[in-house]
Image (spheres, helix red, strand yellow):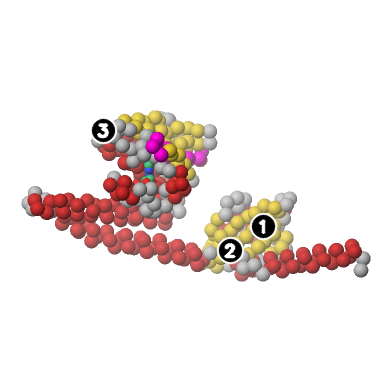
Amino acid sequence: MNPDRLRARRLLGELRDLRAAAASLSDALVLLGAEGRVRWCNASALRLLGLAWPRDRDTVLAEHFAGHELGAWLREGGTEPDDVAAPVDPAMRLQVELIPYGERRHLLLARDISRVSRLEQVRRDFVANVSHELRTPLTVIHGYLELLDPEDVPALAPVLNEMRTQSQRMRQIVEDLLELSRLEMQQHVPEERVEMAPLLESLRREAEALSHGKHHVAVEGEGHLDLLGSPKDLHSAFSNLVSNAVRYTSEGGSITIRWKRVGTGAEYSVTDTGYGIPADHLSRLTERFYRVSSSRSRATGGTGLGLSIVKHVLNLHDAQLRIESEPGKGSTFTCVFGQARLLEAP
Ligand code: ADP
C-alpha cells in the first residue's frame, strides 16, 4: 500500500482509539467550539447532563442549560471549577470544570460527586447534632459547678477550680463547633454596612482587656472605608485574630491592628511580635483542631477552631486569609477583601 495511505489509515485508527477511550469515560466530556457550541460529547454526557450525540451537535450549551445552575456557571465563563446540581436530576451533584484548549475551544468535564456530597452532609449534620446535644448537659454541669464555692470546701478547691476551667473549655468548644456548623450551612451573608471605625475601636478595647496591660496595642485605620457583609461574622473573625495575637505573644510584645486600602481592595491585618509559626505549619493552620503546639493553645484557652471560623467567614465574603510568620519574630494575619465588598463611609 502507498505509504501516505498507510499513514492516513494508522492516524484514523489512533483517532478512533482516542474517541473510544474518551467515549468510555465515566465522567461526562463535552468538546465545545466557538460560542460554546457542542462539537462532540461522550456517552456519560447523556447520563449526567442529558446531552446526546449527535442529537445535540452545535447546541449552544449555556442556552441549552438556561434556568439551571450549570447554565449560569457557563454564562459566567466557568473560570473556576464548581459544584452544581445535575440538570437531569437535582438530587445529583456534579463537579464541573471548563478547560480551555486550542483556539477558542473548551473541554467541559463533569463528574458525579453525589456520594462525596452526601457523606460531607452526613459529617456536617453529625457535628451539628452532637454539638447541639452536648450543649444542654454542659450548661447544667457548669451551672452546678458555679454554685459550689471553693471556699466552703478548701480541701477540694484546686479540684473544683480545675473542673470549672475544663467545663468552660468544653462549653467554648461546643459553641465554636456550632458556630462553624452555622457558617458551613450558610450560602450567603447579609449585605449590611459594617462600619469599620467603631469596629476597630471595639477590637482595640477587646485586645486591651485580653492583654491586661501586658502588651502594647495600636490601631491604624482607614476611617472612611466600610465593608459590606455580616457585621456579626466579621466581628467574630477579626476578633479571633486579635485574640490569637494576644495569646501567642509574650508579655511586653506589640500588637498592631490595621485597616487599609490597597490597589485591588482593602486589607484588615493583625501583626504581633509573638512566638511566630514555623513555615511547614502555615498551610494547615485553618484546619479544625490543628495546633502548632497543643499545650500552648490549651494553656491560653484555645479551642483550635478559631482560624477555621475566620476562614469560613472570609469565604462567605469572597475574601482570603494570608498568613506571614517568622518563628521568634512574630506573625501577620491578613484578610484580603475585593473592591466589591468596600463602601465609602458616609
Ligand atoms: P487556637 O484556639 O488553638 O488558638 P486557632 O485555630 O485560632 O486555634 O489557631 C490554630 C493554631 O495556629 C494555634 O493553636 C497556634 O498554634 C497557631 N496560631 C494562631 N495564631 C497565631 C499567632 N498570632 N501567633 C502564633 N501562632 C498562632
Locate residue 218, reporting x and y percent. 35, 30
Classified by dominant secondary structure, the portion drawn in magenta counts as strand
The relative height of residue 314 versus residue 135 in the rendered view (above or below) is: above
Q: Nearer the viewer's eye, disc 3 or disc 2?
A: 3
Identify the residue under disc 1.
107
The secondary structure type at the circle numbered 1 is strand
| Residue occupying the point 31% across, 60% down | 132
Residue 329 occupies quadrant = top left
Q: CA distance from mark 3 to mark 2?
A: 55 Å
Where does the N terminus fall, quadrant-wise? Answer: bottom right
The relative height of residue 152 versus residue 327 in the rendered view (above or below) is: below
Q: Nearer the viewer's eye, disc 1 or disc 3?
A: 3
Locate residue 296, reporting x and y percent. 31, 46
Callout 2 amino acid: Arg
Residue segment shown in magenta: 327-339
| Residue occupying the point 53% across, 64% down | 113
Q: CA distance from mark 1 to mark 2?
A: 13 Å
Callout 3 amino acid: Gly
| Residue occupying the point 89% across, 62% down | 4
Residue 330 in the magenta stretch? The answer is yes
Please report whichever mark, 1 or 3, sits nearer to the chain's N-terminal start.
Answer: 1
Identify the residue under disc 3.
213
Locate residue 342, reporting x and y percent. 47, 37
Identify the residue under disc 2.
111
* 88 to the left or right of 40: left
Q: Are marks 3 and 2 in contact (CB under 8 Å)?
A: no
Dot 3 alpha-carbon crowd within 10 angstroms: few under 14, some 14 to 19, many 20 or more: few
User: Ligand 1 quadrant?
Assistant: top left
